[in-house]
Image: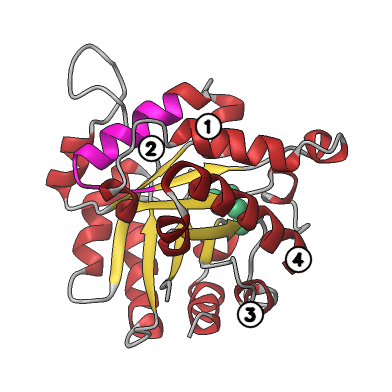
Amino acid sequence: MRRYVIAGNWKMNMTPAKAQALIAEMKPLVAGKDNCDVVLCVPAIDIPAAIEAAKGSNIKIGAENVHFKASGAYTGEISAEMLVEAGVEYVVIGHSERRQYFGETDQTVNLRTLAALNAGLKAIVCVGETLEQRELGYTETLLKFQTKMALTNVTAEQMKNVIIAYEPVWAIGTGVTATADQADEGNGYVRAAVAEMFGAEIAEQTIVQYGGSMNDKNAAELLSKENVDGGLIGGASLKSAAFSAIVDAAQ
Ligand code: 13P
């Protein structure tokens, strides 16, 4: 049995003070929801405040990116060791916004994934097709390729700390959610790629989330699908009621 993982991705939202207030609001709403792991991936500057605010609760804190080098002349970047020492447990890697706006490639996604896993972080690796790629019929090919590239040189043992989020680019921030069947199918392609690399047993154990306009209205249907083991939630993770309702849907 795979556990649900419901993760928020705050993107570039919330100051440290606002982060503290939102987490304080969320804590009682998600308390005792033991059927799933609850994670909030927050801007780097918010991490200390978020960790402090989440103390004594079931909310785990994640980062939104990590650099692939251990240290050095990489102005503006943050290493895996820095995140670990700050108390971070998860990190989002290869989000489509980073691929689109910050030159992230399948190769850098792979290097960041390895750096995160080698430091003991749980990596939430994002894959997803654009609308154009879907219309051309490349969804399966692309999802499998992105998944395999991201997981190159990852060990079978490290796969325990890998979560893959299928996020169709056309569904992110658009209000257009994939249908539950489309989400299940996309997640199924990701799982098939994991099976081709690591075998059926590891593929069965790997958590594959769906992300893209997931909210309190559509979460239950999406999460009811065989291959959907949780969600990576943008906009709806900025509101305590909507986010906690998604956590409820995973019970
Ligand atoms: P939205 O939930 O705002 O569509 O964002 C999804 C996402 O990109 C999560 O990483």
Q: Residue at x 60, y 56 (%)?
A: 211
Disc number at residue 181?
A: 4
Up the image or down, 135 lies above or below 30; here it is above
Q: Nearer the viewer, mark 3 or mark 2?
A: 3
Amino acid type at mark 2: Asn
Q: Is residue 11 visible?
A: no
Q: Which dot, 3 or 4, sits closer to the camera?
A: 4
Question: Which of pointers 2 and 1 lies earlier in the amino acid sequence?
Answer: 2
Q: CA distance from mark 1 to mark 3?
A: 28 Å
Sooner in the amino-acid sequence: mark 3 or mark 2: 2
Magenta segment range? 108-123
Amino acid type at mark 1: Arg
Category of crowding for the residue at label 2, using alpha-carbon neighbours closer than 10 angstroms: few (below 14), some (14–19), many (at least 20): many
In primary-sequence order, the first of circles 1 and 3 is 1
Q: Residues within 10 Å of mark 3 (few under 14, many from 20)?
A: some
Marks 2 and 1 close (CB-CB < 8 Å):
yes
**In the foreground, 99 or 110:** 110
- At horizontal 64% and vertical 50% (from top left) the residue drawn is 189
The residue sitting at 61% across, 56% down in the picture is: 187
Tell me which label, 4 or 1, sits earlier in the chain.
Answer: 1
Structure colour scheme = secondary structure
CB of residue at label 1: within 8 Å of ligand 1? no
Q: Which residue is denoted by mark 2 in the rendering?
A: 65
Q: Which residue is mark 3?
A: 220
Residue 5 occupies quadrant: bottom left
Mark in the foreground, 4 or 1:
4
- Please tell me which residue lies in front, 13 or 171: 171
